[in-house]
Each structure stands twice: as C-alpha cells, then as structure tokens.
Image (tube, rainbow, N blue to C red):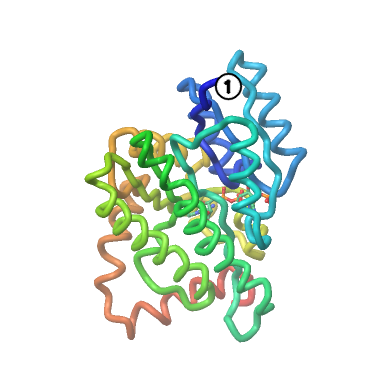
Amino acid sequence: MSAPRPAVLVTGASGGIGADLARIFARHGHDLVLVARSAEKLKALADEIESTGRSRPLVVPCDLTAVGAVDALAARLEAEGVVVEILVNNAGYGLLGDVADLDPVAQMGIIDLNIRALVALCLRFLPELRARRGKILNVASVVAFFPGPGMAIYYASKAFTLSFGQALGQELRGFGVGVTTLCPGVTLTGFQARAGFTSDIAIMRFGAATSASVAASGYAGLIAGRRTVIPGFSNKLLCRIVPLLPRAILLPMIASMQKRKTGKT
Ligand SMILES: NC(=O)c1ccc[n+]([C@@H]2O[C@H](COP(=O)([O-])OP(=O)(O)OC[C@H]3O[C@@H](n4cnc5c(N)ncnc54)[C@H](OP(=O)(O)O)[C@@H]3O)[C@@H](O)[C@H]2O)c1
C-alpha cells in the first residue's frame, strides 16, 4: 500500500476567495482537494493548476449542506489515499434582508453551511490534523465583530466562526495544530450577487479588495501561525472601533447601511 498523500482541502474553491486560496497553495507546492457544488468550475480550476506544472487537484463536487456530505467527502479522500494536512473552511454565503422577510429555508442554509459544515469538517479531520501537526484556516469576516440587522444570521454566523476558531486554536496549541481565522472586508466576488445586493454602494466601488489580495493575506497569516488575520488597515480599524459604539447608535446605523445595498433608500 502506498503512503497517504497529504493535501490541502479547500471548500468553496469554485470561485472568489476560495479559488485564489487554492491557486496560492498550489504555487507553494501543496497538493489540493477542491470542494464546492459547481463541478465544471472546479474542473476548470484543476485544469488551470495542472497546466502550470503542479499536480492535478482532486475535484470533489458536493453540497456541504446535504445530510452526510462531510462523511461522504471523508470516505472519498480515504479511498483516494489522501490525508488532510491543511483544512480551509471558506465556503459560505449570506442573504440581504430582514429575518422576517427572507425565505426561512435559505436562512437555515446559512447556518448549515457557515456553521454546521465548518464544524463538521473540523471534527471529522481533527485526528489527522493532530497526527500531522496540521493547520486550519477558517474564513469569517469583519462582520464577525458586531451584529448586523438586515443580514442578521450571516453576521452571527461569522461571529460564531471567529469565536469557535479562536477557542479551538487555544485548545489545539499543545498539539501543534494552528488555527487561523481570516476576516476579510468587502471583497468583490460572487458573494454580493448570491446575497442579493442590488445597489452599487460607494464602499463596493472604492473600498473593495480583490479576492487575490485577501487570499494572499490569509495564506501569509496561516503560515505565520497568526490567530486572526484582518486584511487592510481600514478593516483593522473598523474591527477595533465599531464594536465600541453604543448599540443604540450602531444597530440603526448598520440597518440603514444594509437598506442602501437593496437600493430601496
Ligand atoms: N466577498 C466578500 O465581501 C466577503 C467578505 C467577508 C467574508 N467573506 C467570506 O468569504 C468566503 C468566500 O466567499 P466569496 O466572497 O469568495 O464568495 P463566492 O464567490 O460566492 O464563493 C463562495 C464559495 O462557496 C461555495 N459554496 C456555496 N454554497 C455551497 C455549498 N452548499 N456547498 C459547498 N460549497 C458551497 C461556492 O461554490 P458553489 O456555488 O459552486 O457551491 C463558492 O465556491 C465566504 O465564507 C464569505 O462569507 C466574503
């Protein structure tokens, strides 16, 4: 029997930040497992990476919110002789709108993907990550630092990601497993369309980062063993100052900012 092949598992690798993270890991010589629902986009990325002379990533199309998806993914990796040395929990989405107005099933899907699948992947791959003194990169957001009326479940899901990642990282310190939480600000990807943003607000035109630059910050922070990575000076400032505002000011301010993204104000 041949030795297991260590690889970096990237969820949400079919576009945006996840695809750019995959490209960076490939450039640094890592073998990859690419996961998302869009099989064609994953195959195109695998072709692109292979064409640069790197080994072809293993493509595993799957809906991580489906019952049994994480077990099926783990079984596939076992069958392929792949062990996870770095787990990148990047897949996620949000929805713009008030809780009472949005489709309940779609809202529960945010919890299923951003929280449930992320935790299930950590739990499932923890034994091999510990055995190999591996790493976990969880993608949260700057919105993890404050509540978000108008995108309430999304903001809360990212607060969970940040809190869980920091606590897990502390627990795993003695085992040599690093846990880094990446907290990007506005980044132009497929995220805005899926969330239902219909209005082009100024921050998106002038303050947005590229997925490539966010991925580069995440990779560098992970390799440096950093607990939390907030790309960009203005985002770092935002995460320090906004949580200090009295809730009576902060909550209506965020609610009105979300309304502007709908184009209704
Ligand atoms: N863009 C921003 O402004 C921003 C800011 C802060 C944090 N983030 C976070 O960054 C992460 C990456 O998002 P992005 O901005 O790169 O958005 P994106 O372009 O929409 O990418 C999301 C990725 O998640 C995958 N995905 C969605 N639902 C899935 C499911 N049920 N099962 C498996 N994969 C699924 C998508 O692929 P398929 O559709 O093919 O499944 C896609 O690859 C997310 O966690 C997001 O919350 C984004």
- Quadrant in the picture for residue 200: bottom right
Q: Quadrant of the N terminus?
A: top right
Q: Residues within 10 Å of mark 1 (few under 14, many from 20)?
A: few
Q: Is residue 265 left or right of 136 when viewed as pictured? A: right
Residue at (40% x, 52% y) in the render: 183
Direction top: furthest residue: 53
Above or below, 66 relative to 187: below
Q: Find residue 28 and report its horizontal and vertical position in percent.
A: 45, 22
Query: Which residue is at the front of the view, 238 or 81?
Result: 81
User: What residue appears at the point 53 percent right and 76 percent down from the top-left corner?
Assistant: 150
Residue that badge 1 annotates? 1
Question: Looking at this rendering, what residue extends furthest in the right direction?
Answer: 40
SS of the residue at dot 1?
A: loop
Residue at (33%, 36%) from the top-left corner?
A: 133
Q: Horizontal and vertical percent for residue 72? A: 65, 49
In the drawing, does residue 96 fall left or right of residue 152?
right
Percent x, y of residue 170: 25, 53
> Quick check: 142 above or below 34?
below
- Judge whether 3 appears above or below 12 on screen: above
Residue 251 in which image quadrant: bottom left
Quadrant location, the C terminus: bottom right
Q: Amino acid at mark 1?
A: Met
Label 1 lies in ligand 1 vicinity (Cβ under 8 Å): no
Number of marks present in the image shown: 1
